[in-house]
Image (tube, rainbow, N blue to C red):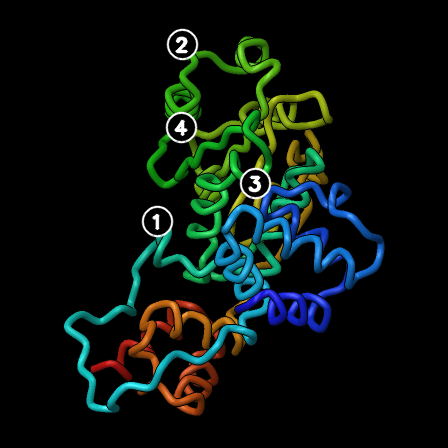
Amino acid sequence: MNRIELRDALTQHFDLDDIRLLCFALGIHYDELRGDTLSAKSIALVEWFENRETVAQLAEQIYQARPQLRPPTPTTPTNTRLTTNPFGDKGKVTETQRYLVRQPMTRMVFDELSKHNSVSLVGDSQTGKSSLLWHVAQQAKSTLGPDHEAVYLDMQLLADDNDFYDELCYLLQVQPVCRGLQLLRKLRGRKVVLCLDEMEKMTWRGFSHDLRSELRGMADGPLTPLRLLIASRNPLEQLFPDSAEHTSPLGGLCHPFRLPHFSLAEAEALVAQRLGALSSPFHAEAVRQAWQRSAGHPARLQAELWQLTQ
């Protein structure tokens, strides 16, 4: 995109609130951009990147926020063969260049975390929850600020409370291993996003009500050191229901988000990302049919696209 195309994309497909979110994602102070109107803010934003010769970064962020604006890739012969199939990922995607940033969901998660809120991310199996948590953990410092840190914890690998605190303290470089009030004191003054994947495991024998209570104590309120980003297949109130003996410690703590399946625009963006110039053999209708057959389910969509590349 040239400067005129960038300005037109911003004024025609974004509003002022969208520009504010765009600035947040790019690490720019919205209020420092001159002007009050959409047109003035858009021009100031384009000039900000032009002055730093990083216009491509702005264009890529626009494409991620509005995948339909990404230009079509150059056409190639339809008999082009791939040496390796770029689809069919199993498990979480940890390679940045292979991860398709989910928007607006990623912006919404970061927005809540920036307000010192914890987040519960609920979604079907194999819909990308783990990949999103991993991405947030990698991008937390650059998105939320250099004073933030994030750790990713896979609950599947842990057997009980002791395992949990042993791994958490190792990741946070806290020695000796401790929990509860002692850990809270050691973390005081730090801003930690704790990404907990496969939260269902915490319902198993070996994980106590005390653990969940201690997590709440370290994450409840603006001055506490932890913010939780929890991924699960079921809402937290179902995993840890209230009982006659006590109230679920995680009840009401996290802002709930449901992770949707891929939209058609996201399916098209995935094809363009994985294939680049080779995406031309994938006619729009073929991608649309693969998306319909999979109902947008990310794992099933990749299986459909994998078949198309064979």
1 or 2: tag closer to the N-terminus: 1
Q: Which mark is residue 143?
A: 3
Q: How far apart, in angstroms, are the residues tagged by discs 1 and 4?
A: 26 Å
The residue indicated by pointer 2 is 175
The residue indicated by pointer 4 is 160
1 or 4: tag closer to the N-terminus: 1
What secondary structure is marked by label 1? loop
Q: How far apart, in angstroms, are the residues tagged by discs 1 and 2?
A: 28 Å
Q: Is residue 229 visible?
A: yes
**Residue 298, picture quadrant:** bottom left
> Could you tell me residue 33's position as x and y percent?
74, 46
Q: Is residue 104 left or right of residue 272?
A: right
The answer to the question of whether label 3 and label 4 lie on touching residues, with beta carbons closer than 8 A, is no
Name which residue type carries label 3.
Thr
Within-10-Å neighbours for mark 1: few <14, some 14–19, many 20+: some
> Could you tell me residue 163's position as x and y percent?
37, 25
3 or 1: tag closer to the N-terminus: 1
The answer to the question of whether label 1 and label 2 lie on touching residues, with beta carbons closer than 8 A, is no
3 or 2: tag closer to the N-terminus: 3
Name which residue type carries label 2.
Gln
